[in-house]
Amino acid sequence: MPNKHLSVIIVPHTKTSTRTLCFSRKTLKTLAIGGVILGLVLLAMMVDYARMSVIRGRYKALRAETAEQRSAIAGYEKSINELQTKISNLESYTKKLNIMAGLKSPDVLTAPAGVGGGDPGKDEQEPYIEPPAEAPAPAASGPQHIGPGTIQNLSQKAQSIESNLTSLLSFFESDNLRLASTPSIMPTAGWISSVFGHRNDPFTGAWTMHWGIDISTNIGNPIMATADGIVIKVETDKYLGKNVTISHGNGFTTVYGHMSNFAVTAGQKVKRRDIIGYIGQTGKAAGPHVHYEVFKDGKRVDPRNFLLEE
């Protein structure tokens, strides 16, 4: 029995002879199976491509969302760090208010350095204290992670400060006279060039106690009373040069040294921010500045504990 086959006759448009292609049944089956397999492979590739396109789209969306979240987290961390700084400043400010109100004792703050000399203390024996050794610089650290504990700690601090300020508000509302007579401002506009504490004397190099703060500024600038009071001394000596002493009551007395000229006389009443003299370089002074001291109950204290404006 002759094998069954399929003949395909190709008739060209030109005058060339026709061509006949013969395919056996077996060959046709092979071609059909191959075509089906090829179609399935192409279909699978198309499905896989579509699936990968969807995955790529989701991946891009996730990356964009992650970038937004990271940006938001960085913003939150920056805000929390700024809040930490503000709360720390507010704690320092509240501490000063407590000291002014007499509700807490001031911490002793010491630091070397300075540019002005001053009276080493007419009524006090100064003990010798070894200069502190230089501490190694702290190692640099990377950004801190902001966790739930940090936020809880900030919340507790804020509640504590709020409670303290409420108490202080009630105290000061009922004690306006005491507030008016408490030193609370800088005596002049300038920068603190030497703080309260032990330092190397700028003239002798000796390790001595500096009983006030030095505020450097331009010569001739006004010096103001830091609280209401009565001028009890207007004098000149070899340490503070031209200086003024004001009694404020409630145990407070302030001293202003190295003036170029006086603007008040002994016995005169002054209000906070009244001009009492002008910046100079009289007495033991290495440059134009005012040497400012605060006495509380007869003892010198750190004036920075009473500076609400710096």
Image (tube, rainbow, N blue to C red):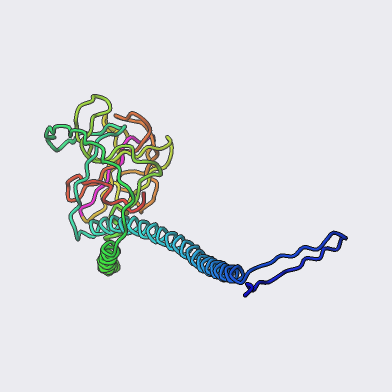
Nearest to the observer: residue 23 or residue 42: 23
Residue projecting furthest to the top? 204
Nearest to the observer: residue 275 or residue 44: 44
From the viewer's perspective, tell me whether residue 105 is left or right of residue 35. left
From the viewer's perspective, tell me whether residue 202 is left or right of residue 49. left
Residue projecting furthest to the front? 1
Residue 267: percent from the left, percent from the top?
A: 30, 47
Nearest to the observer: residue 273 or residue 109: 109
Residue 63 visible somewhere in the drawing: yes
Q: Is residue 210 magenta?
A: no
Q: Is residue 255 magenta?
A: yes
Q: Quadrant of residue 116?
A: top left
**Residue drawn where x is 38% and y is 51% of the image:** 273
From the viewer's perspective, tell me whether residue 115 is left or right of residue 15. left
Q: Quadrant of residue 162?
A: bottom left
Q: Which stretch appears magenta?
A: 251-261
**Residue drawn where x is 30% and y is 42% of the image:** 140
Q: Quadrant of residue 97?
A: bottom left
Nearest to the observer: residue 88 or residue 260: 88
Residue 61: percent from the left, percent from the top?
A: 49, 65
- Image height check: is 169 above or below 94? below
Residue 236: percent from the left, percent from the top?
A: 29, 33
**Quadrant the N terminus occupies:** bottom right
Q: Main secondary structure of the magenta part?
A: strand
Residue 269 visible somewhere in the drawing: no
Residue 283: percent from the left, percent from the top?
A: 30, 30
Q: How many marks?
A: 0
